[in-house]
Amino acid sequence: MSKSQSKFNFGAKKAPDKSVAERHFSDFIVYVDESGDHNLASIDQDYPIFVLAFCIFYKEHYSNLVVPKLQKLKFEYFGHDLVILHEHEIRKEKGDFNIFISKEQREEFLEKLTDIIEDSNFILASCVIEKTKITAPESENNPYHVALRYCLETLYDLVLEKGQQQLETHVVVEQRGKKEDKELELEFRRICDGENKFRKNLPFKIRMANKTANSSGLQLADLVARPIGRHILRPDQPNRAFEVLRPKFYCEGGREKVGENYDNWGLKRFP
């Protein structure tokens, strides 16, 4: 082998056995985002909840179908794929999303984005903290940490159901700040080290992603969190975005019962 042929070997003596690597990691990748704030001292009466959403994808479906569809949508409307789909900016038509010259064009974009979410096969685990129902906020843990435990427990229920509880699953969250990230990582590890309803180690690893990472999975998680919150706040109000999400919640009875009995399974509420 010539010097030029070997320069990308990085000193490896032998390529790893692909089957070994595949056995080490599960088939799933998880992306996490939130809606609302977790402050219990000062509650926004217009949105007095905190929502944490886990979007759980099969890696093959995510990489082969979900990511290309989102990239194609970005190229179609923006001419490049650097745009980060952020629910707040889309809703308020800020930043990159002030391009729409008519209401019809904006509605067309939203319809195509909703279709991508609807066609994407992911499993949804979420926890909603209803802050006004907490009678002694000073004695409660950080709502983010409470929601995180519930969602990680649901994720474990899923990997157990799929027979992948011995394999490592990565959970990707967006960075929020040095102090917050350190606290979150410590809490994540505490839960996975046995502080959970199963009283056992959970096979999950946290990965922190910068806001500029332009992760398709994180953007989808951002887009689903608020519709869940709106459904909890105003269950009788029409909410097409939530109806699209309803069959994606992890539910009692497995995937044959999609859209049924997801309360306190894929959609947990606290208290």
Image (tube, rainbow, N blue to C red):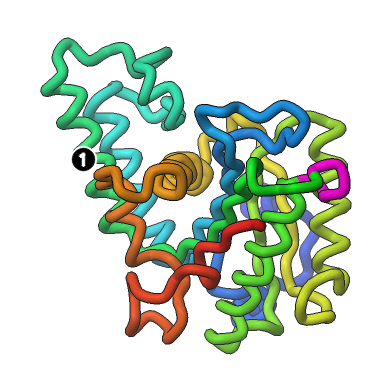
Say left or right for 104 vs 255: left
State whether residue 165 appears in this view: yes
**Residue 196: x percent and y percent?**
79, 72
Figure quadrant of residue 138: top right
At 83% across and 81% down in the image, what residue appears?
A: 200
Residue lying at the far left of the rendered structure: 104
Neighbours of disc 1 within 10 Å: few (<14), some (14-19), many (20+): some
Q: How many marks?
A: 1
Residue lying at the far front of the rendered structure: 135
Along the viewing direction, whichever of 39 and 145 lies nearer the viewer: 39
Q: Which residues are magenta?
A: 137-142
Position of the N terminus, as image quadrant, is: bottom right
Tell me, yes or no, whether the highlighted magenta stretch contains residue 138: yes
At 79% across and 43% down in the image, what residue appears?
A: 137
**Residue 195: x percent and y percent?**
85, 69
Figure quadrant of residue 245: bottom left
State whether residue 216 appears in this view: no
Query: What secondary structure is marked by label 1?
Result: helix
Position of the C terminus, as image quadrant, is: bottom right
**Residue 19: x percent and y percent?**
60, 82
Q: Which amino acid is tagged 1?
A: Lys
Tell me, yes or no, whether the highlighted magenta stretch contains residue 113: no
At 63% across and 49% down in the image, what residue appears?
A: 129
Say left or right for 34 vs 149: left
Residue identified by numbered label 1: 112
Figure quadrant of residue 171: bottom right
Q: Is residue 170 above or below residue 196?
A: above
Along the viewing direction, whichever of 210 and 243 lies nearer the viewer: 243
